[in-house]
Amino acid sequence: MFCNQCEQTAHATGCVQSPGVCGKDEDIQSLQEMLLYGVKGMCSYAHHARRLGKVDEEVDAFVEEALFATVTNVNFDLEAHLELVLECGHKNLRVMEMLEAGHIEKFGIPSRTTVREGTVEGPGILVTGHDMLDLAGLLQQSAGAGVNVYTHGEMLPAHMYPELRKHPHLAGHFGGAWQKQRSEFDQFTGPVLATTNCILHPKESYADRVFTTRVTAVPGGHRLKGNDFAPVIEKAKECEPLPNNFVRESQVGFHRTAILGMADTIVQAVKDGKISHFYLIGGCDGAEPGRNSFSEFARSTPADSFILTLGCGKFRIRDYDYGTLLGLPRLLDMGQCNDAYGAIQVALALSKAFDCTVNDLPLTLVISWFEQKAVAVLLTLLALGVKGITIGPNPPAFVSPNVLKVLQDKFDLRLTNGAMKETVPLSVVG
């Protein structure tokens, strides 16, 4: 990008010259990048919602306004930029609400179910990404074809929808989070259908088995521009059949509709001292070893607490037996990253039941951030006045020291830096 005012090459969000040259400084640039990343994340969710028939003119108008605000020589005011950043959080809440409604209307009310992990003998297709509509189309088109379909990564929550799991050839789940793709896709002998972001450059050993949808594309893969999955199904029949390999069974489907259906029991259990705390541990995971701190923190939670999880961050903490509480698994999988909307609604319902603010609940949020959708969700939480959130393992690179201090002062935003190792986390959020 070229700055029209100081005639210097600039970053995508504006000039990097000193404020004395054209009024830009690192704090303005930091807030503009935060806004752009938030809008990108929100638009990812909005894209899925639109495909399900859900749109909102006010959201679309805000996207235009937010992008316009980052154009050269439009806005040099920190407070105005912070307002836009938080408004992005409010609008993202609306988008997640629309997406949830679209999922429920299309695929039914989510419910608790047991998922077989591993593979069964025969041809198979692995579906990764986030798009439930693509999975539904593949299941419909492959019915009776003698090909099994498996979920991968953030597609695991698909099993909680009755209209998806009614297909007998939705055979289970294979693999973990996105950063393990290059080894896991090598092990999976059938084709892989990548429906959204979180797809890595494929290795040559399996690149010809990778199919992507619409704007998603990788070198060496096959991009599907429409909704015809015949090439994927035919490829599955050509590939080496999968072996029968049972890994384990897991439970999913603790969507907000399921948890709120148990609200009376949960509230009474808290009053009776049977539940001491709730932890939300999840988010968008990364590959750095330092993120193991999330699993360490989860294992340190007391036996009379529940751990809510969502997003691909769940794969950091799900390979451990946390036991049960009130006849339920202590680790409750609420769904995809966009189902953070459900976690917010659960918190609001509990605050109403206890006649207090959400910030007064025995609830702690520990969130891993990695990409734009995680930024959008974090902005939503901040826009709602959530305080005491711990994020990590490191501060986002686009947040300047001054902007980080503003967020810490205003929202008590905390960084991992050993904070998650506290025996009794005192931070509560709303």
Image (cartoon, rainbow, N blue to C red):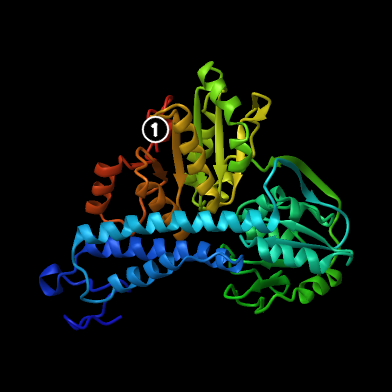
SS at badge 1:
loop
Q: Which residue was labeled with disc 1?
A: 428
Q: Position of residue 91 (x, y in %)?
A: 41, 58
- 74 or 407, nearer to the observer: 74
Q: Is residue 370 visible?
A: no
Q: Is residue 428 visible?
A: yes
User: Can you tell which quarter of the image residue 328 is in?
Assistant: top right
Vertical arrangement, residue 90 with respect to residue 20, above or below: above
Vertical arrangement, residue 156 with respect to residue 112, above or below: below
- 21 or 311, nearer to the observer: 311
Vertical arrangement, residue 305 with respect to residue 54, above or below: above
Q: Is 169 displayed left or right of 348 in the figure?
A: right
Split into 4 quadrants, where in the image is the N terminus?
bottom left
Split into 4 quadrants, where in the image is the C terminus?
top left
Q: Is 409 displayed left or right of 127 in the figure?
A: left
Q: Position of residue 133 (x, y in %)?
A: 67, 64
For label 1, the crowd category at 10 Å Cα-Cα, with few meaning under 14, some 14 to 19 and many 20 or more, is many
The single residue placed furthest to the left in the displayed view is 20
Task: Report the residue at 60% width, 68% height from top.
Answer: 51
Q: Is 223 displayed left or right of 284 in the figure?
A: right
